[in-house]
């Protein structure tokens, strides 16, 4: 069942110590695929490399090839000269990394990737290459996604070695769902499932529903932002997994800046063509600013990649492209040429500024993918301590050969530079790690995204209070999720609920209709209340549509507490009000239907009602989203519908996520709130 919430991303910031070892004969500083057995010390002739780290320590991958494109693997640190902003730097770290992709009987056995620790351990091996294939479906046409599948499948089947680790990602993929694998069948399956969505604005998730009816130009801008965020996040994660070379293969037709007039709709869901709209007299100026915005996005991506020592290879599935738009998409020749050129240039910028290669405007995509593996198979890793200030500016890096190596006609490739961190970046990076959120706080905040039940069409709330004869009263309330802009989903008319104990005793069976209005008096069937014995209870939920069909189903298991043994609290019931008069009306209405959602604006007030069992005086406090106490909240006796209530105006609270903690003795309840502007 789909979660009713917003996708998020987390960035892993874990650095694993590199694995060291050597095999003789080898040039000084070289680290090869063969390593000493566990517990065996390196040979004195092969000193363990020294690894440096810190905010100002810069690592640079350097690829050196001869005239035939073969790697030059006999160089030493003395053969290199590294300059930053024109100043010669002292090379403090030097390694030659050569990868033998063949798994030999004498090699350390490959271990399964079951968790993040396994990934970091395996990725730190010098004979393992790390690849991420990033499917930019937002900027790939459906037909071109089909064309690119064969060269990608050939790549993972013929070029990727048995030791290598590969992951697949889309622009909206949360980082905690990205897994690395050595399974060829899984890789092929992931490639075969790739679908292009360029210029297709049909929403496929809740986040896309939010902007589905924006103008098409605005949707394209948002898509650029999502891709930028995804690339930056995965590059940062790769930097936390290992320090050596990592490669992202970006499958994309490049970033978009403008659309021809025919494809510009005020509503991206409107059929094309829309009523004719003349070009703006400031079209050239607007296009300039749009291009500037995209270039800023590219700089953010390359900055994140360079900080993480991650290379981006861009793969344009159009091959040798002669135009951007199809004949039925009505673009002028100049528009077609300019938009195509900019999209290709955006791919070249990403590749060139991260020491990758742009596989652009060429039909032999497979040859370009071969180079991805070749570059990751033999390269030098140089490191130095930069003296650049924390100014957030770009600092140029130039790597050249010196001495005899310069006269050999070798070619040198390295990234062009990096953007230094700002003072704020340094403070964040060196700050002590924040402790994890207490489990009750994290669970309460998570309930705002998916209150009680996760469904594609409704969300629900289950409250518990003291029932009769030592039982606990359960109240089930549901509300429809906001209608999707596409309007295709059938509106829910009711929820059929079956509640039973784990031994099979039926506690409730019936259909629950919708409330008349949020906070209004309940219709006879607007909610269900029934008693349950303490222990496990199972809810079987079926959402019915107006046509009588079933829209969604769910099975939930609840742990029902024994509220007869005090002191105890009922589940707080939450109501929305806009004025003090609304609060008074709700306070006098014992049958008001509690809210399910927890989103409010600062112009509103929140009324909470609850019951106290076993005596005592309850207290309440407003907490921030980390669980820190911010202020006391007054608790007053309730006129109806509970023993106590809280009237909380939101006008003086800044936008953000908060919790109200209601406590009596050692017992407490947390009510999450999201306050908007």
Image: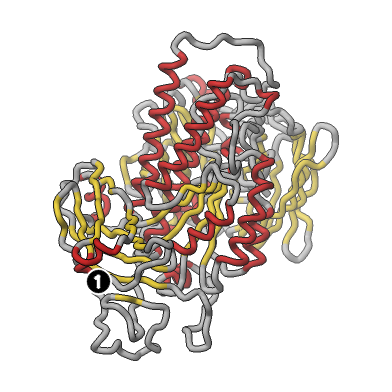
Q: Position of residue 235 (x, y in %)?
A: 42, 53
> Crowdedness of circle 1 by 10 Å Cα count: few (<14), some, many (20+)?
some
Taking the image as shown, residue 515 lies to the left or right of residue 341, namely: right
Is 403 placed above or below 484 here? below
Q: Position of residue 603 (x, y in %)?
A: 44, 23
Taking the image as shown, residue 516 lies to the left or right of residue 450, namely: right
Residue located 34% across and 62% down the image = 64
Kindly state the secondary structure of the residue where label 1 is placed. loop
Q: Quadrant of residue 336?
A: top right
Q: Position of residue 118 (x, y in %)?
A: 47, 72
Q: Which residue is mark 1?
A: 76
Residue located 39% across and 47% down the image = 352
Is 188 placed above or below 313 here? below
Kindly tell me whether residue 112 is visible in this rendering: yes
Kindly tell me whether residue 441 is visible in this rendering: no
Q: Quadrant of residue 74?
A: bottom left
Q: Quadrant of the C terminus?
A: top left
Residue located 47% across and 8% down the image = 281
């Amino acid at each position: 069942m789909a979660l009713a919430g917003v996708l998020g991303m987390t960035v892993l910031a874990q650095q694993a110590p590199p694995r060291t070892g050597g095999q003789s004969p080898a040039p000084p500083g070289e680290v090869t695929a063969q390593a000493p057995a566990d517990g065996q010390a390196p040979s004195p002739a092969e000193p363990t490399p020294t690894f440096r780290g810190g905010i100002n320590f810069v690592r640079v991958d350097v690829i050196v090839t001869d005239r035939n494109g073969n790697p030059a693997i006999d160089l030493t640190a003395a053969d290199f000269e590294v300059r930053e902003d024109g100043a010669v730097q002292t090379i403090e770290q030097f390694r030659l990394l050569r990868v033998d992709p063949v798994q030999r009987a004498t090699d350390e056995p490959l271990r399964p990737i079951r968790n993040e620790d396994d990934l970091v351990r395996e990725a730190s091996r010098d004979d393992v290459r790390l690849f991420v294939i990033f499917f930019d479906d937002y900027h790939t046409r459906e037909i071109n996604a089909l064309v690119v599948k064969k060269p990608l499948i050939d790549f993972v089947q013929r070029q990727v070695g048995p030791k290598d680790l590969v992951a697949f990602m889309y622009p909206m993929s949360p980082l905690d769902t990205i897994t690395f694998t050595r399974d060829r069948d899984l890789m092929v399956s992931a490639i075969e499932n790739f679908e292009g969505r360029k210029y297709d604005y049909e929403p496929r998730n809740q986040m896309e529903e939010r902007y589905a009816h924006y103008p098409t130009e605005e949707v394209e801008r948002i898509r650029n932002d999502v891709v930028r965020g995804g690339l930056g996040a995965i590059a940062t994660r790769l930097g936390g997994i290992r320090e050596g070379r990592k490669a992202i293969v970006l499958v994309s037709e490049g970033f978009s800046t403008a659309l021809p007039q025919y494809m510009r709709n005020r509503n991206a869901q409107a059929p094309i063509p829309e009523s004719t709209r003349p070009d703006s007299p400031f079209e050239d100026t607007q296009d300039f600013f749009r291009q500037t915005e995209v270039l800023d996005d590219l700089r953010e991506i390359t900055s994140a990649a360079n900080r993480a020592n991650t290379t981006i290879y861009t793969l344009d599935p159009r091959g040798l492209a002669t135009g951007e738009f199809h004949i039925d998409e009505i673009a002028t020749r100049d528009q077609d040429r300019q938009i195509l050129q900019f999209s290709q240039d955006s791919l070249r910028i990403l590749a060139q500024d991260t020491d990758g290669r742009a596989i652009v405007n060429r039909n032999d995509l497979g040859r370009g993918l071969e180079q991805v593996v070749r570059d990751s198979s033999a390269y030098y890793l140089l490191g130095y301590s930069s003296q650049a200030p924390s100014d957030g500016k770009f600092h140029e890096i130039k790597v050249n050969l010196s001495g005899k190596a310069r006269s050999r006609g070798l070619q040198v490739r390295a990234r062009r530079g990096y953007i230094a961190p700002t003072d704020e970046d340094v403070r964040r990076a060196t700050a002590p790690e924040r402790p994890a959120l207490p489990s009750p706080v994290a669970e309460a905040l998570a309930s705002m995204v998916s209150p009680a039940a996760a469904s594609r069409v409704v969300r629900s709330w289950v409250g518990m209070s003291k029932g009769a004869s030592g039982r606990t009263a359960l109240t089930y309330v549901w509300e429809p999720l906001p209608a999707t802009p596409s309007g295709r989903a059938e509106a829910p008319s009711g929820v059929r609920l079956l509640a039973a104990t784990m031994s099979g005793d039926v506690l409730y069976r019936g259909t629950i209709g919708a409330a008349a209005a949020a906070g209004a008096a309940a219709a006879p069937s607007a909610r269900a209340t029934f008693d349950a014995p303490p222990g496990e209870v199972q809810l079987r939920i079926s959402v019915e549509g107006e046509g009588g069909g079933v829209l969604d189903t769910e099975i939930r298991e609840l742990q029902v507490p024994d509220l007869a043994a005090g002191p105890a609290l009922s589940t707080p019931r939450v109501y929305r009000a806009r004025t003090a008069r609304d609060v008074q009306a709700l306070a006098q209405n014992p049958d008001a239907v509690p809210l399910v959602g927890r989103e409010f604006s600062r112009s509103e007030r929140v009324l909470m009602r609850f019951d106290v069992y076993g005596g005592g005086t309850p207290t309440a406090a407003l907490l921030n989203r980390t669980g820190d106490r911010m202020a006391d909240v007054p608790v007053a006796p309730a006129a109806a519908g509970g023993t106590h209530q809280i009237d909380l105006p939101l006008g003086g609270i800044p936008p953000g996520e908060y919790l109200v903690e209601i406590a009596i003795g050692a017992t407490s309840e947390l009510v999450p709130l999201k306050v908007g502007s």
